[in-house]
């Protein structure tokens, strides 16, 4: 399934992934309803990404802070191994882990990745950071599964038992994640095509730009003001390409 995003700076065609059907179907539904028509790319950060999909951006006064609007629902995360935040990736925005531990996506807000091209040394450092994050995520999941046991140990003030359990869970998390923090494919993508590797595994990527990457480049380089909102509005209209 493909969607054309018509903007005041040019057209961008995105292909939606079948591997993320909930996001694909929700995006197509909103496009067909005209939900995005007249909305803005309300948040643009050079060498990072362009973001849109806030219904409150439609007709918004100059300087108004945007980015909190949506359709009133979220979408279940569909974070897939092997789908990365490469340049041109289409991904769903979301609230942070502290209020959204399930990493559910915004019902409408999306971003298109620009990022940068990294050298090998930079990617090795990212790989270490990503492995640490994966280990932490695995540890948190296992700790959550054994929450009742942990709470009982705390009530009993069993500090030795808690320390032993923590050591066990850390070892299990390390084993589950393995020694590598990043695949060879990821290393190749980010050292050739470019993108934003630190977002992998954190947000759902549900498509990619097929045409108009030069338009994305133009948009991400536009002048912005408060809240990373472009000084000159960049509005959009979308249509599903059958």
Image (tube, helix red, strand yellow):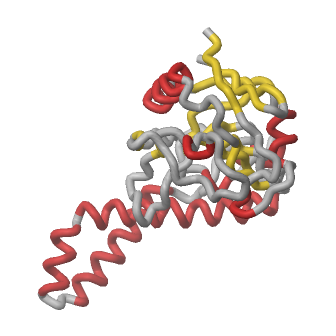
Q: Residue at x 65, y 57 (%)?
A: 64
Measured as percent of width and height from the top left, residue 124 is found at 73, 61
Measured as percent of width and height from the top left, residue 50 is found at 72, 46
Q: Residue at x 70, y 43 (%)?
A: 41
Q: In the rendered picture of this protein, how many numbered marks are placed on residues?
A: 0
Q: Is residue 84 visible?
A: no
Q: Residue at x 85, y 41 (%)?
A: 217
Residue situated in front as seen by the camera: 85 or 105? 105
Q: Residue at x 54, y 30 (%)?
A: 35
- Height in image: 164 above or below 94? below
Q: Is residue 27 visible?
A: yes
Residue situated in front as seen by the camera: 170 or 144? 144
Residue situated in front as seen by the camera: 7 or 98? 7
Measured as percent of width and height from the top left, residue 200 is found at 60, 50
In the picture, which quadrant includes the C terminus? top right
- Height in image: 123 above or below 74? below
Measured as percent of width and height from the top left, residue 148 is found at 16, 69
Residue situated in front as seen by the camera: 51 or 223? 223
Name which quarter of the figure residue 55 lies in. top right
In the picture, which quadrant includes the N terminus? top right
- Height in image: 240 above or below 134? above
Tell whether 154 sits left or right of 35. left
């Amino acid at each position: 399934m493909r969607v054309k995003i018509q903007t005041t700076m040019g057209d961008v065609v995105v292909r939606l992934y079948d591997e993320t059907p909930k996001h694909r179907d929700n995006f197509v539904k909103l496009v067909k309803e005209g939900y995005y028509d007249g909305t803005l790319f309300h948040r643009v950060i050079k060498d990072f990404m362009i973001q849109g999909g806030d219904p409150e951006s439609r007709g918004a006064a100059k300087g108004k802070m945007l980015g909190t609007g949506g359709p009133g629902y979220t979408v279940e995360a569909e974070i897939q191994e092997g789908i990365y935040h490469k340049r041109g990736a289409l991904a769903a925005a979301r609230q942070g882990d502290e209020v959204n531990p399930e990493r559910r996506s915004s019902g409408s807000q999306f971003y298109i990745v620009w990022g940068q091209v990294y050298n090998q040394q930079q990617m090795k450092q990212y790989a270490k950071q990503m492995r640490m994050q994966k280990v932490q995520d695995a540890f948190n999941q296992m700790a959550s599964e054994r929450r009742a046991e942990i709470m009982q140990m705390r009530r009993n003030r069993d500090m030795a038992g808690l320390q032993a359990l923590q050591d066990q869970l850390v070892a299990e998390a390390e084993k589950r994640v393995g020694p590598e923090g990043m695949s060879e494919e990821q290393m190749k993508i980010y050292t050739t095509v470019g993108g934003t590797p630190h977002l992998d595994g954190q947000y759902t990527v549900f498509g990619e730009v097929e045409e108009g990457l030069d338009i994305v480049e133009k948009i991400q380089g536009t002048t912005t003001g408060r809240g990373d909102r472009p000084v000159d509005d960049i509005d959009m209209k979308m249509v599903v390409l059958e």
